[in-house]
């Protein structure tokens, strides 16, 4: 019995650490850079880089927001009174948890003072006949409503503004504790998001993704992998589709899952949310773009340590072109 208490105590401590760290994100939260502009045609290096960078920033910010919500759902439920953790400049309102509602209000800088976040994300779990279906239930879907959720990168002043709804399904149920016992967490995501960029361009992007979370070394590190989760236009692994900033209809296909670190129990967090490997192809644009994640400065796949960045490649009238861009 004493050993069981020790194990349960260790698991509780790990979960609290995961929740806290999930709210204090990495230092590398600046927007993806683009090369100095040439003639800004639809297939210029600057525009091609912008398309790939917009996608990566969209993914990073919505992933981190979803992870905030997941951590809040771990700490607040109909079976727990109040949360035992906090994020930097985020207020978690659980006063309506009996109705399945939790609200996150962002009011300032992140924990590393690299970005300013404002706005609200409202979480709604299924509620019927006076009963809330808890987040640990297999197959439950939570609705995450983004209300003027804005991320401004302090170094550059550039920003993204999100409005819309993410529906996240906890496919196999359970919570963070199951990672400790070697069972992955699988989330299915469907979304329609309005995104406004700092140049006043506003677009609507649709999402169909699957995220899988696993662990190594007894929760020393939690990994995430991301896959496209629908078939469209002959492409089998579509993750995002819509219209980009220059008015092109696009389809992002993910033929190779994108993997990244989400959390370390100890040590440096410098690699968090930097894709370690994976591939994305931007179809439908003037010249389709292939994005290879997790490369070194020469564009070669990096197999150890934190990768330098990602390589974008395309072919146009000038031949085959590519750029290697760093993660910031």
Image (cartoon, rainbow, N blue to C red):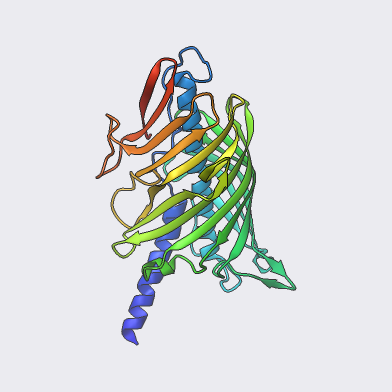
- Residue 54 x/y as whole percent: 51, 33
The mark total stands at 0
Above or below, 110 against 47 in this view is below
Q: Position of residue 309 (x, y in %)?
A: 34, 35
Residue in front for this viewpoint, 118 or 311 = 311
Residue 219: image location, x then y, percent? 34, 62
Q: Is residue 78 visible?
A: yes
Residue at 52% across / 33% down in the picture? 283
208 sits left or right of 294 in the view: right
Query: Image quadrant of residue 318?
Result: top left
Q: Say left or right for 292 vs 239.
A: left
- The quadrant of the image that shows the N terminus is bottom left
The residue under the point 47% across, 25% down is 48
Compared across the picture, whether 328 is left or right of 190 comes to left
Q: Position of residue 313 (x, y in %)?
A: 39, 28
Q: Could one spot residue 154 in this view of the protein? A: no
Please tell me which residue is depicted at 38% across the width and 22% down the height of the picture: 321
Give the answer, above or below, for where 16 lies relative to 57.
Answer: below
Decide which of 161, 82 is in the foreground and name it: 161
């Amino acid at each position: 019995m004493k050993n069981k208490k020790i194990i349960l105590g260790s698991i509780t401590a790990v979960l609290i650490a995961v929740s806290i760290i999930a709210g204090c994100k990495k230092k590398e939260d600046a927007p993806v850079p683009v090369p100095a502009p040439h003639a800004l045609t639809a297939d210029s290096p600057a525009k091609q880089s912008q398309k790939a960078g917009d996608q990566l920033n969209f993914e990073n910010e919505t992933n981190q927001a979803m992870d905030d919500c997941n951590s809040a759902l771990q700490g607040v439920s109909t079976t727990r009174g109040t949360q035992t953790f906090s994020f930097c400049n985020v207020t978690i309102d659980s006063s309506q948890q009996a109705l399945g509602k939790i609200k996150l209000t962002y009011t300032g800088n992140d924990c590393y003072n690299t970005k300013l976040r404002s706005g609200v994300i409202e979480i709604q779990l299924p509620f019927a006949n006076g009963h809330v279906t808890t987040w640990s239930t297999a197959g439950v879907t939570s609705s995450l409503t983004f209300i003027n959720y804005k991320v401004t990168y302090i170094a550059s002043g550039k920003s993204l503004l999100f409005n819309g709804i993410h529906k996240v399904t906890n496919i196999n149920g359970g919570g963070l504790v199951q990672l400790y016992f070697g069972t992955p967490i699988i989330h299915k995501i469907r979304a329609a998001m309005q995104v406004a960029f700092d140049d006043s361009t506003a677009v609507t992007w649709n999402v169909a993704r699957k995220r899988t979370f696993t662990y190594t070394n007894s929760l020393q590190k939690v990994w995430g992998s991301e896959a496209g989760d629908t078939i469209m236009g002959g492409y089998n692994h579509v993750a995002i589709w819509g219209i980009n900033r220059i008015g092109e209809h696009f389809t992002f296909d993910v033929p190779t899952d994108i993997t990244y670190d989400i959390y370390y129990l100890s040590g440096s967090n410098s690699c968090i949310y930097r894709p370690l490997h994976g591939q994305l192809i931007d179809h439908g644009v003037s010249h389709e773009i292939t994005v290879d994640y997790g490369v070194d400065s020469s564009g070669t796949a990096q197999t150890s340590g934190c990768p330098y960045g990602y390589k974008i490649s395309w072919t146009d009238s000038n031949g085959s072109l590519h750029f290697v861009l760093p993660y910031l």
